[in-house]
Amino acid sequence: MESLKQRILAESSVLSSNVLRMDALINHQVDPALTMEMGQEFARRFAEEQITKVITVESSGIPAAFATAYTLGVPLVFARRKKTLIADPDAYVERVPSFTKGMVTDIMVSKQFLTAEDRVLFIDDIIANGDAARGLIKIIQRSGAALVGLGVVVEKSFQAGGRTLREQGIRVEPLVRISSLDNGEIKFE
């Protein structure tokens, strides 16, 4: 997605050879027009899949997932990272490490929102090592729902996440693939 590449170059910063700060685009501030464009592109790529729900992990995946769900005309479900007072005690739970947060958290999805009848599209902001993605995929599998694919805004292809999921037979569709962040320079595939 060329418009996204240009915005990443203009508004993101490389913090290390593994970390790209995209606060101005998807992690802290969100451009609604760009986000809707992302959602339309994901919807186009997965149009033939008869999707019944879009799913993501809170919080940075929510804007792109919402735009995708809106475009497809289906509900959005997001896995919560924190248990609340009104959290469903009958939920799917999985422990996942976070690459950017440097900690392990539980993610949970209420069983009432994810069933064996669902055909689910997983949308996320970034895939690096793929730990959070694998955790949510385990929840989807336990629910009996069919995972039709994973759409990611940015795939850091120099890290193993996207590759290992593809090796498991999961369709991974990045809008942008970054091959390197070495020497403070963003290189796209």
Image (spheres, rainbow, N blue to C red):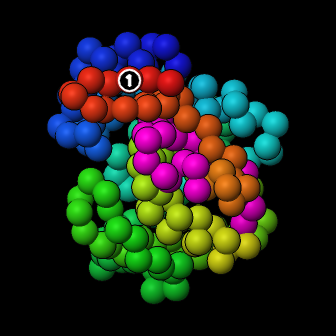
Q: Mark 1, residues whose alpha carbon is within 10 Å: few (<14), some, or many (≥20)?
A: few
Residue 4: x percent and y percent? Answer: 43, 20
Name the residue: 52% across, 85% down: 90
Q: In this view, does 38 lie above or below 56?
A: above
Q: Mark 1 points at which residue?
A: 187
The stretch drawn in magenta includes residue 165 = no
Residue 144: x percent and y percent? Answer: 73, 73
Magenta region: 145-164
* Residue positioned most to the left: 15
The stretch drawn in magenta includes residue 155 = yes
Residue 19: x percent and y percent? Answer: 26, 42
Q: Quadrant of residue 31?
A: top left
Name the residue: 49% across, 52% down: 160
Q: Is residue 118 above or below residue 94?
A: above
Specify whether 49 is left or right of 164. Answer: right
Specify whether 124 is left or right of 173. Answer: left
Is disc 1 placed on a helix, strand or loop?
strand
